[in-house]
Image (spheres, rainbow, N blue to C red):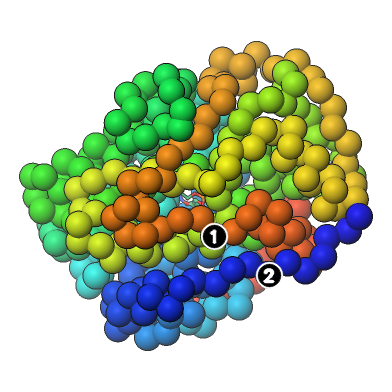
Amino acid sequence: MTSSRVTIPTMTTLQTTSIHDAYRERSVLITGGLGFIGSNLARRLVEVGDVEVYLLDALVPDQGGNLFNIEDIKDQVTLHIADMGDPSVINHLVGGMDYVFNLAANVSHLDSMLFPQHDLKLNCQSQLTLLEACRNFNPHVKIVYTSTRQVYGKPLYLPLDEQHRCAPVDINGVHKLAAEHYHLLYHRVYGVRSTCLRLTNTYGPRHLMRHNRQSVIAWFIRQAMDGGMIDLFGEGRQKRDFNYVDDVVEALLMIGASEKAEGDVFNLGSHEPVSLSHLAEELIWLTGHGTVRYVPFPPERQLIDIGNCYSSYRKIETLVGWEPRTTLRAGLASTIEFYNNHRAHYWDSKIESTPRILTTA
Ligand SMILES: NC(=O)c1ccc[n+]([C@@H]2O[C@H](COP(=O)([O-])OP(=O)(O)OC[C@H]3O[C@@H](n4cnc5c(N)ncnc54)[C@H](O)[C@@H]3O)[C@@H](O)[C@H]2O)c1
């Protein structure tokens, strides 16, 4: 069966109004703004209208930065291609901002084990450079930092809540946890208004699809669309939660608008965790292609595997009313439709046309 058009639910009027009120006529910097989640956030802010949207991205090789992600909004945002770890860039940039959505990071857990120093540079050093810039040039700016539920490590109980102990099982998790603490420390000591969101597996349009080291779900989508093999390690029984990117963008904007969220940490999560084998079956059904293959765990992945893992989003729901609105089937269908239309920009590593670039580094 091929995918049919599925309608993604829209926000309530209340959500739309409060987001408009919070962001209209404000200046917003998105670090990692050419990446998967950053570019979807940028589009949403452009849609709000009357928001000055600034994007900072170094187009780090092997990560999700892609100029095509902002192709149709490139005249409505200001793009800086530069490294967040360069003080001469970031000191200048944070000055006039009302909000910073800090998404720039190394995302691959596997790569962090292969290149730990690189992960340290992107996930710790660069984060400190941003925070120092805020402390010195814009001490009361609002920062939303995207952390990961990987900071919990192997679950002691499920679903994971924010009280669960943090014991990351890979370098990336250790560094993301350190960066969370940097953000919280700069809040406590210097008054920077930071909030950390622990994201779970996010999927949707504009994701990195070129290799399989960043996201399981993105790779499964690609394999299904290509009629390839979807490898399930073990029996594919590991349960995970998946959030459609529009829901994650909404959470970022809602938590960014909340004063009560400052200095605190919040999970995202989904209504129903699903097994990886169920995810594969769903994709095969939606695309009409792909085959499941059961394979033993590769040793390098087994070492950092966390088994069943999914989070409770009760805390953010209680504070700002966020909940995921997109069902897995609807989200997957719209994702497949997007890549059917734009596959050429995501299946290879070609650099796309050049938008307005102010700085280079
Ligand atoms: N995608 C997920 O499932 C997921 C899950 C948990 C957490 N997160 C977090 O969400 C954030 C965004 O993830 P994503 O999936 O959009 O990743 P992505 O790879 O698509 O985007 C990250 C972007 O950051 C840029 N970048 C990295 N270091 C930089 C630096 N020093 N200076 C400037 N730009 C830099 C990269 O070039 C890339 O474009 C990350 O912090 C990630 O840890 C994502």
Whether the residues at callouts 1 and 2 have beta carbons within 8 Å, the answer is: no
Residues packed near mark 1 inside 10 Å, few (<14), some (14 to 19) or many (20 plus): some
Q: Is residue 358 left or right of residue 135?
A: right
Q: Earlier in the sequence, mark 1 or mark 2?
A: 2
Q: How many marks?
A: 2
* Quadrant of the image containing the N terminus: bottom right
Q: CA distance from mark 1 to mark 2?
A: 11 Å
Image check: 168 left or right of 144? right
Residue positioned 41% across, 58% down in the render: 322
| Closer-to-camera residue (121/39) | 39
- Residue 216, given in percent of the width and then of the height, sits at 65, 38
Is residue 191 shown to the viewer in this render? yes
Placement of 151 over or under 329, stated as above or below? above
Looking at the image, the residue that sits furthest to the left is: 189
At x 10%, y 53%, the residue is 191
Q: Secondary structure at mark 1?
A: loop
Residue positioned 57% across, 22% down in the render = 307
Q: Position of residue 328 (x, y in %)?
A: 66, 51
Q: Which quadrant would residue 91 be assigned to in this image?
A: bottom left
**Which of the pair 259/270 is nearer the observer?**
270
**Amino acid at the residue labelled 1:** Arg
Circle 2: element type = loop
Name the residue type under label 2.
Thr
Which mark, by number, is residue 55? none
Give the percent coordinates (x, y) of residue 94.
25, 64
Q: Residues within 10 Å of mark 2 (few under 14, many from 20)?
A: few
User: Pointer 2: what residue?
Assistant: 7
Q: Camera-side residue: 355 or 359?
A: 355
| Left or right side of 232 for 121 | left
- The verdict on label 2 being within 8 Å of ligand 1 is no
Q: Which residue was labeled with disc 1? A: 325
> Can see residue 83?
no
